[in-house]
Amino acid sequence: AQTVTQSQPEMSVQEAETVTLSCTYDTSESNYYLFWYKQPPSRQMILVIRQEAYKQQNATENRFSVNFQKAAKSFSLKISDSQLGDTAMYFCAFTPPHMYSGGGADGLTFGKGTHLIIQP
Amino acid sequence: DTEVTQTPKHLVMGMTNKKSLKCEQHMGHRAMYWYKQKAKKPPELMFVYSYEKLSINESVPSRFSPECPNSSLLNLHLHALQPEDSALYLCASSQEGGNYGYTFGSGTRLTVV
C-alpha cells in the first residue's frame, strides 16, 4: 500500500513571495504518477501539476514547479510569485500506473494536505 | 466538455430518508470514483467504477449504494444514513488508470439530521 505524507499543516507567506510545500511518499512500485491538487474554499479540486515517475525532468506549469527526487521519494511543490488566489488547501497525491486496456483504476492516495495562506 | 457535474450541491436529509447523488461527465472517461471528504481532511476513496463495473469498494457501509447506469453517469444512493455520514461527497473521473490526472466535480455537501 502507498502512503503520502505532508508534514506542513499550514503555511503563510506574503503575496509575491516564493513558497515550497513538502511531500514524501512510500511505495514499492517503480513507476507511478504524482500530483498536486488545489482545493480553494469553493471546494473544487483542481489539478495543479502532474509528474511521471519514470521522467527525470521536473514538471512545470507557469508559476508552479516541482522538485521530484525519486530516490528520496520526495515531491515538493514550488509556487513562485504567489498570488492571493493561491490561497487554498494543497494535496499531494499518488496513483500507480495502468498501462493496459480494461485494467481498472485504483483511485488517488492523498496526503493530509497543507493549508496555504497568501497574505496581502 | 471538460467538467464533472454533481447534483445537488447541497442536501439535507433525515436518518430515515432515501436520497441519491448524481455525477455526470462527457469526457469519455472510463473510470469514475466516489470520495468522501470530512472538514479539514483529505478525500477518502469509497468506490471505483471501471468500464461501468464496480472494481473497488473500500469497505463502505451498505447504506451507501453506488450505481453506474452508463459510461457517463454515476449515482450514489443513500439510505438510513447516520449524522456522522455528513460530509462533502466528491465525484471524479479519469481516463482508465488515472495516469493523466483525475477531474473532480465540485461536490455535494450532505448534512444528515
Image: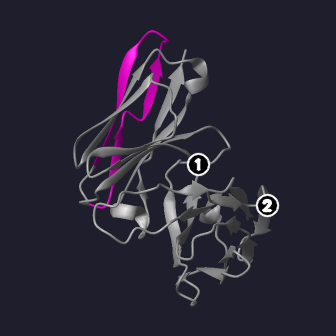
Tell me if residue B15 is in the magenta stretch: yes
Number of marks: 2
- Residue flagged by tag 2: what amino acid is it? Gln
- Residue flagged by tag 1: what amino acid is it? Pro
Residue B71 placement, left or right of B20: left
Mark 2 lies on a secondary structure that is loop
Quarter holding the C terminus of chain B?
top right
Frontmost residue, A32 versus B103: A32
Between the residue at mark 2 and the residue at mark 1, the CA separation in whole angstroms equals 19 Å
Frontmost residue, B79 versus B52: B52
Image x and y of residue A107, in percent: 47, 55
The residue stretch that appears in magenta: B1-24
Q: Is residue A50 above or below residue A89?
A: below
The secondary structure making up most of the magenta span is strand
**Tag 2 residue:** A8
Task: Estimate how packed mark 2 is, as few (under 14), some (14 to 19) or many (20 or more) residues with alpha carbons within 10 Å.
Answer: some
**Quadrant position of residue B16:** top left
Mark 2 or mark 1, whichever is nearer to me: 2
Q: Which mark is residue A41?
A: 1
Quarter holding the N terminus of chain B?
bottom left
Subunit bearing disc 1 = A
Task: Estimate how packed mark 1 is, as few (under 14), some (14 to 19) or many (20 or more) residues with alpha carbons within 10 Å.
Answer: few
| Residue drawn at the location 59% of the way across and 19% of the way down | B83
Image x and y of residue B21, in percent: 36, 32
Frontmost residue, B3 versus B92: B92
Image x and y of residue A59, in percent: 55, 83
Frontmost residue, A39 versus A99: A99
**Quadrant position of residue B19:** top left
| Residue drawn at the location 33% of the way across and 56% of the way down | B3
Subunit bearing disc 2 = A
| Residue drawn at the location 56% of the way across and 26% of the way down | B85
